[in-house]
Image: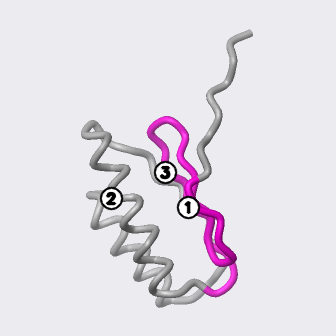
Amino acid sequence: MPSLEPCHLIANRPDYVVAIWRQIFCAIWRRETTEDAVRRVTDACVAFANQHPRGIGLLAVIDVSEAAFRSSLDELREAIGCR
């Protein structure tokens, strides 16, 4: 059986977790998400996307229902060129 490639934990904060696996960027949002947290995750995602010119997958798990956060997520998707 082939071995599985592990994911790499990039950040583990009270309000978010970021991990990467192959060409997939995973952001798990929890608790109260701050603008600073969104900025940090966006910067990390853009840097990751720049390393993969053929594109990346973005998996976002959201444990909040704030409208402001959802607009920030739209900005993140726009920053990395999601359609």
Q: Which residue is mark 2?
A: 46
Q: Which residue is mark 1?
A: 27
Q: Which residue is mark 3?
A: 25
Q: Which residues are magenta?
A: 10-32
Can you give x and y, in whole percent of width and height, for residue 79 in the image? 28, 66
Neighbour tally class for label 2: few under 14, some 14-19, many 20 plus, Cα within 10 Å? some
Pointer 3 with pointer 2, Cβ within 8 A = no
In this picture, is 44 found above or below 69?
A: above
Q: Are marks 1 and 3 in contact (CB under 8 Å)?
A: yes
Q: Earlier in the sequence, mark 3 or mark 2?
A: 3
Say which residue appears at 69% left-offset and 18% top-offset.
Answer: 3
Return the x and y of residue 58 as percentages of the image width and height.
Answer: 46, 53
Q: Quadrant of the N terminus?
A: top right
| Residue 67 percent location from the top left of the image | 50, 89
- Closest to the observer, 68 or 18: 18
Q: Quadrant of the C terminus?
A: bottom left
Q: Residue pushed farthest top? A: 1
Which residue is rendered at x = 33% and y = 49% of the image?
A: 49
Where does the image place residue 8, in percent across and percent down from the top left? 59, 44
Give the alpha-carbon distance from disc 1 to disc 2, as whole Å. Answer: 13 Å
Report if residue 25 lies within the magenta region.
yes
The amino acid beneath tag 1 is Ala
Question: Is residue 60 highlighted in magenta?
Answer: no
